[in-house]
Image (cartoon, helix red, strand yellow):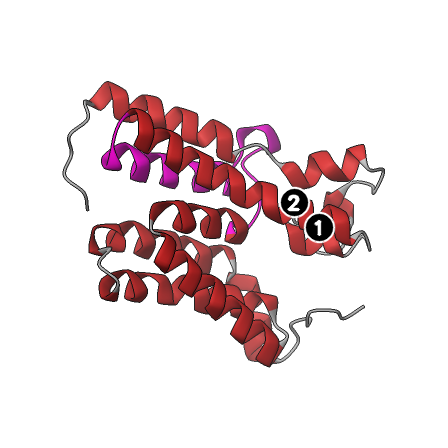
Amino acid sequence: MPDITSSIPVLILWAVLGYGLGSVSFGMILARVMGLGNLREIGSGNIGATNVLRTGNKKAAALTLLLDGAKGAVAVLLARAFAGEDAAQVAALAAFLGHCFPVWLRFNGGKGVATFIGIVLALAWPVGLLACATWLAVAAASRYSSLAALMAAGMSPVYASFTGYGQAFVLLLVLAALIYARHWSNIARLRAGTESRIGAK
């Protein structure tokens, strides 16, 4: 954990701003703007890029991935620039919670993988790059997006420990735990051998 140098009101402010940024559901917005239908009624019903891809619109899925990642990164970078590293970590956690539990969608949001990657890239870019490499390697080998996400998130605290970003260890551990919790149904399907693979109809 970083040293707490900001005042409590400042940390609360960045928690609120981070949550607000994170709660913008780009998948839902893009699906509506691009006439793709209601994501809640498509595929898994999730608001993330993987489910947007199930609409058949790769452009919309790519934009959702980029924007969901960007909102996490922006929350971290703004908090770091205007307050400090402690505020950046608070904003990071809040942005992640905003994506997963947005008040606008009755606290039923996405699983947080893209937002997590954006956060980690902004918070500790070497860790973020290693997490991305892990996702790509596991996804290429298994064709399971969920397994790739679980491995990337689970390894991030380990990567932080060995790349000089130990102050992010606790936050990354918490985010990884939340990702595992959000993927509980995927884990069950992986164990049962019924999880859908990338590119499957």
Above-or-below relation of 116 to 164: above
Above-or-below relation of 34 to 169: above
Q: Which mark is residue 110?
A: none
Q: Is residue 95 visible?
A: yes
Above-or-below relation of 126 to 147: above
User: Which residue is painted at 61% across and 36% down in the image?
Assistant: 25
Above-or-below relation of 51 to 198: above
Q: Which mark is residue 61?
A: 1
Residue 145: image location, x then y, percent: 60, 66
> Is 155 on the left or on the right of 70, as rendered?
left
> Is 93 on the left or on the right of 188, as rendered?
left
Where is the C terminus found, in terms of image quarters? bottom right
Frontmost residue, 136 versus 176: 136
**Residue flagged by tag 2: what amino acid is it?**
Thr
Residue 130: image location, x then y, percent: 41, 65
By secondary structure, the bulk of the magenta-drawn segment is best described as: helix
> Are dots 2 and 1 in contact, CB under 8 Å?
yes
User: Which residue is painted at 21% across and 50% down in the image?
Assistant: 167
Q: Which residues make up the magenta segment?
A: 83-112
The CA span between labels 2 and 1 is 5 Å
> Is 53 on the left or on the right of 70, as rendered?
right
Q: Mark 2: few, some, or many residues within 10 Å (few <14, many ≥20)?
A: many
> Is 24 on the left or on the right of 43, as rendered?
left
Residue at disc 1, secondary structure: helix
Q: Is residue 108 magenta?
A: yes
Q: Is residue 177 visible?
A: no
Residue 92 picture quarter: top left
Q: Residue furthest top?
A: 9
**Residue flagged by tag 1: what amino acid is it?**
Ala
- Residue occupied by mark 2: 64
User: Which residue is painted at 47% across and 40% down in the image?
Assistant: 72
